[in-house]
Amino acid sequence: MNKKKEMIAMLLAGGQGSRLGVLTTNVAKPAVSFGGVYRIIDFPLSNCINSGIDTVGVLTQYQPLQLNSHIGIGIPWDLDRNNGGVMLLPPYESKSNTDWYTGTANAIYQNLAFIDAYSPDYVLILSGDHIYKMDYEVMLDFHKKQGSEVTIACMPVPMEEASRFGIVVSDENHKIKEFEEKPEHPSSNLASMGIYIFDYPLLREALLTLSDQSECDFGKHIIPYCHKKNCAMYSYEYNGYWKDVGTLSSYWQANMELIDIVPEFNLYEEYWKVYTNHDIISPQYIGESASIDKCIIGEGSEIYGDVYGSVIGAGVHIGKGTTVRNSIVMKNVRIGDDCVIEKSIIAEDTRIEDEVKLGVGEEAVNEQFPTHYTDGLVTIGEESVIPRGISVGKNTAIAGVTVLEDYDNGTLRSGGCIIKAGETS
């Protein structure tokens, strides 16, 4: 019999992250690499253990293989425990049918048995795809002090961006008077972060009551249900660093912020460590003719060229005469000699042969996915191959093993895509 827990966390990590394009073809968004060493899910998991939360259910669905392998039994986060710890919770087959998760709240509803096993007083709902540090214990103390039944973590956003979020209107005591899910004309700029603490009896009631609701979500269904019942609902205002890396531009920007002279988001604080699961590999090697400035360089990398303002993962090889600028290069990428890599995101296990140029020429709107591939970026999916001598323009995407014949006279012009059979956007 499991011991009762005061609060457990339910971490939603099943999202596809389609706006990250070819980066999420084969991996769930929370499993995408970040900062050279980490994966996005490392941040909420580290927040949990740093906040004293030792029981976490991780709800997976889309392309879970890398995510499952990364989390394992939770050893890096001290979540390998007999009572509690981390538990991966994919959709499963019941006696009556097999149900995919059809919304954030539906995913929790399908795992009520897991929550019931711990008889918690409170349940913390988290997203697995945000970069931030937060002490959830402080948020719980606020929840208790206010006599709240539902507490929503919120932060101010620019008014012109408010319509992208669930918007909260609170009084001077932080009591929520209104909640609007992605309103066309928002009443405030206080945005929900998708982080909630519920009194468990209320959450259970809401989930059971709305169980027949298709695509049941917290913002669209559970929060309005609680508000309509006149439950005690409060906003917990957070003013630290928080980044939703849901687009390629925001993902690239968040990585680049790590290498600022005084980074707004510090990965190296002793009192709030970010933990991850990574192999113990060889040290870095920097060649005698190499030049590096303002970069993060992962373990086991070999740098023979010039790297400026970039985030380089573990086990990367950068050849002689190659220049890499303002780019994210994930682990085990091999870049040949005499290449020019400008403002590119290159996913894991990709091979770029000699004399390749990425990010050249003038910008043009991407023809197939104009909202995905923007801001002059070149995006290369994992395990791709770029043959020798190819030039690639801006706002472009490549996925798969490409050959010279895939290109127009050795060029992928700005705004173009090469996505090989079996790959998606």
Image (cartoon, helix red, strand yellow):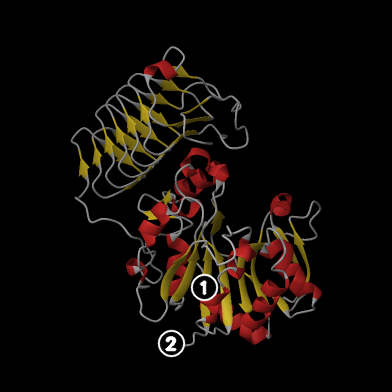
Does residue 312 appear in the picture of this structure? Answer: yes
Q: Residues within 10 Å of mark 1 (few under 14, many from 20)?
A: many
Does residue 169 appear in the picture of this structure? Answer: no
Q: Position of residue 137 (x, y in %)?
A: 52, 79
Q: Judge by depth and name the residue closer to the eye, 118 or 6.
A: 118
Q: Secondary structure at mark 1?
A: strand
Amino acid under label 2? Met
Amino acid under label 1? Ala
| Residue at horizontal 43 percent and vertical 12 percent from the top | 409
| Residue at horizontal 54 percent and vertical 22 percent from the top | 362
Q: Position of residue 151 (x, y in %)?
A: 66, 75
Q: Secondary structure at mark 2?
A: loop
Name the disc covering residue 265, or none. Answer: none
Q: Would you name the residue on which mark 1 appears?
A: 9
Q: Quadrant of residue 311?
A: top left
Residue 210 against residue 1 in the figure, above or below: above
| Residue at horizontal 35 percent and vertical 63 percent from the top | 72
Residue 249 against residue 397 in the figure, above or below: below
Mark 1 vs mark 2, CA separation in Å: 19 Å
| Residue at horizontal 55 percent and vertical 53 percent from the top | 15
Q: Would you name the residue on which mark 2 appears?
A: 1
